[in-house]
């Protein structure tokens, strides 16, 4: 298993998860109120994208359950699918964690008060 098995929607949700991180780097380089204001909606987009990607993954896991006969192999496939379904939310929240730490650095450099 790996990223090469990911569908187009999964790849899109992973890419959207990186957008706040890129914006945070921009904010560290150029700490303006405008860039900080963009961080908020982009962070929400990253969160919603990660959650949506994971929910879609779990939908596919459940689809395996209703399209196959219950057997040991079916449960193994479902377990792997469930684990892979968590990747978008983990990537999204990891990127958000680093992004907001970078925002804190940018605010420290700028002497901003929010």
Image (tube, rainbow, N blue to C red):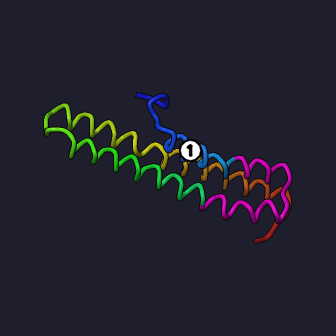
In the rendered structure, the answer to whether residue 83 lies left or right of residue 96 reads left
For image coordinates 42% across by 46% down, the residue present is 86
In the rendered structure, the answer to whether residue 57 lies left or right of residue 51 reads left
For image coordinates 46% across by 42% down, the residue present is 87
Q: Is the magenta stretch mostly helix, strand or loop?
A: helix
Q: In which quarter of the image is the N terminus?
A: top left
Q: In which quarter of the image is the C terminus?
A: bottom right
The relative height of residue 51 versus residue 13 in the rendered view (above or below) is below
Tell me where residue 8 appears, x and y as whole percent: 51, 39
- Total tally of numbered discs in the picture: 1
The relative height of residue 100 versus residue 2 in the rendered view (above or below) is below
Tell me where residue 23 appears, x and y as whole percent: 73, 51
In the rendered structure, the answer to whether residue 41 lies left or right of residue 93 reads right
For image coordinates 84% across by 57% down, the residue present is 31
Element under label 1?
Answer: helix
Residues in magenta, as a range: 22-44
Quarter-of-image position of residue 77 = top left
For image coordinates 54% across by 51% down, the residue present is 93
Residue position for label 1: 12
Quarter-of-image position of residue 70 = top left
Tell me where residue 82 appears, x and y as whole percent: 33, 43
Tell me where residue 24 appears, x and y as whole percent: 73, 52
């Amino acid at each position: 298993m790996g990223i090469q098995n990911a569908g187009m929607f999964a790849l899109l949700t992973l890419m959207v998860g990186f957008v706040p991180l890129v914006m945070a780097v921009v904010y560290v380089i150029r700490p303006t109120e405008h860039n900080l204001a963009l961080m908020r909606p982009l962070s929400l987009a990253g969160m919603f994208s990660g959650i949506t990607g994971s929910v879609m993954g779990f939908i596919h896991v459940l689809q395996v359950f209703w399209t196959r006969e219950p057997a040991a192999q079916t449960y193994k496939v479902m377990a792997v699918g469930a684990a892979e379904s968590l990747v978008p939310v983990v990537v999204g929240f990891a990127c958000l964690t680093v992004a907001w730490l970078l925002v804190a650095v940018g605010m420290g450099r700028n002497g901003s008060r929010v």
